[in-house]
Image: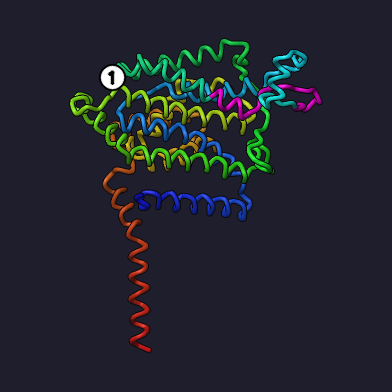
Amino acid sequence: MDMKRYRPIGILLIFVICVQLVFTLSGTEYFLTQIIMAAYYCLVILGLCLLMGYTGQISLGHAGFFAIGGYTQAVLTTINLSSFADSGFVRFLESAGILFRRTDLYGEEILSFSPWIAIIAAIVITIGIAFLIGIPVLRLKGHYLAMATLGFGMIIYTIVIGTRFLGEADGITKVPPFQLLPGIVVCGKMAHRVANYYVAWFLVIVGMIVALNLVHSRVGRALRAIHGSEEAANAMGIHSSKYKLYIFVLSAVFASVGGIFLTHYNGSIGPSETSVIKSVRYVAIVAVGGMDNLWGCLFMGILLNFLSLRGVFGSFDEVFFGLSLIVIMLFAPHGILRIAKVQELIAALRELPAYIKERIGKKKKHERHTA
């Protein structure tokens, strides 16, 4: 096993802990709220990076998969089956642990699906829809594929905003907190903010490990071959259709998991999460970070989503992401971190620890000679 591959993961973990300590000790812990939300959006971006950067497939419909996960979770955990509690089937589900009882703010008893069961259902539904969409759509290429996925996103948005069962324009609210482990609850309450910060980053780190293992495996080499030339990859015996479909489904699952946990964290989900402009935003961030650069996408995803959630761009938020996409495609198609000057800066930062170590060694040697 190449441990050098995982060294940045360790550095990221240390950085995550340091950020939490700095914000907590400085009394600015409220910043963690936006970082938590940005981390969940980054799951979508990591999945999209795999799809766009390593197989060359453009998707403008990933907000749809984010919504499928979030809405499925919201529906199953807020539906009230109390009126059917006396039926044999519902009693069986409750005795099997599939349903659980709780009370809302007004003391009304609610019998709904366990969040764990809802997660399984949301991911299974996402995988099923991704397969159904991916099999015909991935036969297309270039802008035809982009248009087809754009159509999928628009369909999801139309369904969400036109279905009373899904809350229409108001979305679904009162999604209950998710008891992940004893003492760890996914919700937006201030008392659980730090725990939620680590839950969000745990998912991001797991997602990054999965992605890194994938791109450095035999499958990753096949994906890069497909990206280079699908015809040449097929000629070498690579089943390009199968690989493209699997990555499409995996990226959809990444998006769905982000939607699931963000829905519990916010306690709600609305149609804005399914809008086409959200999908464009994800594509813009992947382009800015570098389409085949997982670390670049993660960095830019956290940064840009954090700034957006803090309201830095104001009412020009969507304009900023659209303009970023245009500028990057014109002047830095391989991502902002691949610009020569930025690469030189990154290389200098990598050499900084060795330079400091060398300087300290020389200083100690000089002190021994002068002593």
Residue 6 in percent (x, y) is at 40, 49
Tell me if 98 is positioned left or right of 200 in this view.
right
Pick the residue in front: 167 or 135: 135
Residue 112 lies in magenta, yes or no?
A: yes
Tell me if 195 is positioned left or right of 281 in this view.
right
User: Residue, x 32% and y 23% (percent of image)?
Assistant: 242
Pick the residue in front: 17 or 340: 17
Residue 208 in percent (x, y) is at 43, 41
Pick the residue in front: 113 or 311: 113
The local crowd at label 1, few if under 14, some if 14 to 19, many if 20 or more residues have their Cα within 10 Å, is some
Which amino acid, mark 1?
Answer: Lys
Residue 233 in percent (x, y) is at 22, 28
Q: Label 1 belongs to which residue?
A: 141
The vertical placement of 132 against 299, above or below, is above
| Residue 331 visible in the snapshot | no
Colour scheme in the image? Answer: rainbow
Q: Quadrant of the C terminus?
A: bottom left
What are the residue bounds of the magenta stretch? 102-122
Tell me if 297 is positioned left or right of 339 in this view.
right
